[in-house]
Image (tube, rainbow, N blue to C red):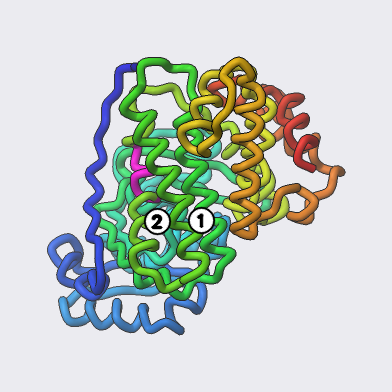
Amino acid sequence: MNNFDFYAPARILFGRGEENRIGQLLAPHAKKILLHYGGGSVKRSGLLDRVTASLKAAGVEYVELGGVKPNPRLSLVHEGIDLCRKENVELILAVGGGSVIDSAKAIAMGVYYDGDVWDMYEQGKGIDKALPVATILTIPAAGSESSGDTVITNEEKQLKLGYGNSHLRPLLSVMNPELFFTLPANQLANGVADMMSHVFERYFTNTTHTDLTDGLCETVLRTLMKNALIAKDDMTNYDAWAELGFSGTVAHNGLVGMGRDQDWGCHNMEHELSAIYDVAHGAGLAVLTPGWMEYVYKDNVPMFVQFAVNVMGVSGSYRDPDAIVMEGIRRLREFFRKMGLPGTLAELGIGEDRLEEMAKKCTGAAFGSEHPVGGLKKLYWQDVLNIYKLVK
């Protein structure tokens, strides 16, 4: 097990009706906030009205900025930064899923920066402070409600990049599983694939003596798969959504990755799909992850045997570990199919004409300085291209 420094201060308020207390929760922290959200669902559901009523009752002033899209755009972030400066905003409340929260975090750190906030994503510049962010989660998927991470799409450059900093962990996050009841089935499926990938990126490692976090990862994965199928058949099942929502938080608040080298190859590869083709992040991960497993598993066969047995329930002769691994991968693909997720790039509307371009952008080779992605196996652009072709 590696040395680690674990700090996860985000306050999680879980359960029915907790969003109605948002005004009194935020009043001690800010007199004026930016209310940030996405499309019309928060309005149609009545959630936005309840939130604004709670803010008014607590004496918290607010300005609104809606319009966040999946794969949140840099252009809206710029608009939000200008608005926060003009209105002297003291806190940002994100009402939505990971895209809204990531956009809020980008705005929060851009307010105090004299240059373009994209510098942080592209150059990895550090930050000393950011506006506090609070969230009301409406889609369990990204885990951004408790992480210090944010991902933004630069639509002009067709690049999707992530950034992480402890200053970006939300001050508090509200999670009421009832808010998930009206989600369409594809958002459930995409969210589950994303949450599972957050665990996979930490679970598949060459670090040894990680019994505790191995077990935590495996439990979260089994919990996600079990309850995803329950929620798929009954989209108003509170208990299933509660398990999914809390699992998404645990999957990405850092806990299950402590003491182990991490991978993140699949996330890097998928960002290229979303940046150019604007595909749903979870759907892209569902396509890439099994292909990545097939491509890299021989670099650590025991790790993938452990996954197949402990997570996917595979039995068989340990004298034939390859068969055990491949059955585990097959069962993962089968689960994704049951959830209605795609299995190939073609199903995402992605042809072969830009695969090499994406592989080179993924590793930096397109920009003259290649840096392999991944941890369990280092992937250069040719490797990324091979994986793209494996799932085309």
- As shown in the figure, which amino acid type bears the numbered disc 2? Leu
Labelled pair 1, 2 in contact (Cβ < 8 Å): yes
- What is the x, y in percent for residue 130? 32, 48
Nearer to us: label 1 or label 2: 2
Q: Name the dominant secondary structure of the magenta segment.
A: helix
Provide the secondary structure element on which disc 1 rests: helix
Residue at 26%, 40% in the rendered image: 8
- What is the x, y in percent for residue 365? 71, 26
Instruction: Answer left or right for 57 relative to 114.
Output: left
Residue at 80%, 43% in the rendered image: 392
| Residue 244 numbered tag | 2
Q: CA distance from mark 1 to mark 2?
A: 9 Å
Nearer to the camera, 81 or 73: 73
Instruction: Answer left or right for 166 relative to 338.
Output: left
Q: Answer whether residue 4 is visible to the viewer in this image.
A: yes
Relative to 269, residue 260 above or below: above
Residue at 51%, 74% in the rendered image: 39
Nearer to the camera, 225 or 327: 327
Q: Answer whether residue 148 is visible to the viewer in this image.
A: no
Quarter residue 98 falls in: bottom left
- What is the x, y in percent for residue 359? 73, 33
Q: Which residues are magenta?
A: 248-254
| Residue 191 numbered tag | 1
- As shown in the figure, which amino acid type bears the numbered disc 1? Gly
